[in-house]
Image (cartoon, grey):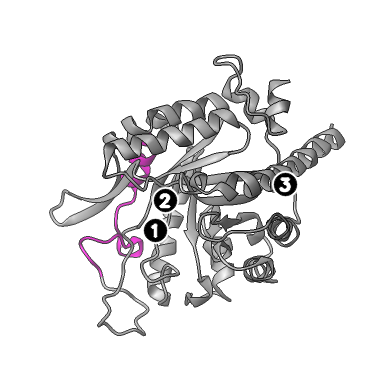
Amino acid sequence: QNLVAQQQGSQVPAPPGELGGGAFKRRRGLNKVFAWVYLHGFSDAEAARMEVEEVTKAIDLDPLFYDGLVLTHLVELGMVQASPLYVFRPELLVNRTAVALYAPLLAAARRYGIEVHGFLNMVPSVLTSPDSDLTNTNPPRSWFNANVSAGTPMGPLIETSVAVAAELGLSGYSTDDETTGCPRRLAGESEAWFEFHDVWGEGLRRNGLQLSTAVQAMSWMSVAGEKGTPERMQRSSIDRFAVMDTYWGNSTWVANQLRWYCENENATALPSKIVAGLYPAGNPNTKVELFRKLEAVQSICGRGKWEKHVWIFDIPGALAVQAYGDVWVPVIRAWKLKGEEVAHEAAHVEG
């Protein structure tokens, strides 16, 4: 009864210890809501603590609303010098200050069966300097950048990623590299970026972990040896692409952005990887307009039985906007309920 009441909007939290994360996981449907937890006040310990407290409180009040959280500052990706000298390798490092800060939120996520992913805002794949030949398709080697095709060891990154996930209870990792906007424009650099994610993603998948990335303006990207960028995205080991192009504009704009990713005849499996990004604090919407955007997610990228995702940028930023509670949460909750009904119907038919 408590769970049903919460899914319908009750503000009564479940009694501590009454239900574990597994019980909440079983109630989750095909329509998923993730949110980036971006701590605006991370440099101010008290401000950051208050932000974590606000997010944790929101989750306690509505445990079934969020299916996943992407936590900033929790982990870092560093290039570590190993033997032989001047051979650098990427490794995942833990920010212990952030771990302590996030402790209440991590506990709430475990309590309610919410996925947690570590966030990285840049990957050290090769980036050609601005004054270099812009037609270059074979980026130069760099001691401080990972170039998989040139032999950069990726095993240590996979090993440390798996170890950190086990320690912190993470479901995976998510990147957001906007170095050149899309995140790479030149064909050689684009392939270096994809190769880095592919090797890392394959290693994570072998260990039951996920890899996602936030992208935008992918039509700017040049890809060598492919029919186009959507095909390369489909072939990659990245599990989900969170599309930031849908942050802005009205429902028509959002639908057009999603069509570029989801209606390519040479990448028919790509829609199962596409996530629509939403930005409540930066792009206010009426209930009708937001409903139309979610319908676009469902109709354009949700034709199969796979999960449909919207990712919110960001909380606690969104929680500070009154319209988030008045408009966004009720509409998104209704969309989530529709996904739960679909999942239950499918289970009934298959049973």
Question: Crowding at label 1, few (<14), some or many (≥20) Cα neighbours within 10 Å?
Answer: many
Instruction: Report, in whole angstroms, how far the alpha carbon at label 1 lies from the one at label 2.
Output: 6 Å
Mark 2 — residue? 200
Residue 248, horizontal then vertical, whole percent: 56, 66
Q: Amino acid at mark 2?
A: Trp
- Asked if the stretch drawn in magenta spans residue 272, the answer is no
Tell me whether circle 2 and circle 3 mark residues in contact (CB < 8 Å). Answer: no
Residues at marks 1 and 2 touching, judged by CB atoms closer than 8 Å = yes
Q: CA distance from mark 2 to mark 3?
A: 33 Å
User: Viewed as shown, does residue 351 lie left or right of 278?
Assistant: right
| Disc 1 element | helix
User: Looking at the picture, which amino acid does disc 1 mark?
Assistant: Phe
Say which label, 1 or 3, has the lower sequence index. 1
| Residue found at the very far left of the displayed protein | 85
The disc at residue 196 is 1
Q: Which residues are magenta?
A: 141-164
Indicate whether residue 145 is drawn in magenta. Answer: yes
**Separation of residues labelled 1 and 3 (CA atoms):** 35 Å
Q: Say which amino acid is labelled 3.
A: Trp
Closer mark to the observer between disc 2 and disc 3: 3
Q: Count residues near mark 2 (Cα–Cα under 10 Å), then give few for <14, some for 14-19, many for 20+.
A: many
Residue 244 marker:
none
Q: Residue at x 25, y 82 (%)?
A: 131
Please tell me which residue is depicted at 63% across the width and 28% down the height of the picture.
Answer: 11
Q: Which mark is residue 335?
A: 3
Residue 26 shown left or right of residue 78 in the figure? right
* Quadrant position of residue 53: top left
Q: Nearer the viewer, residue 66 or 263?
A: 66
159 in relation to 241, above or below: above
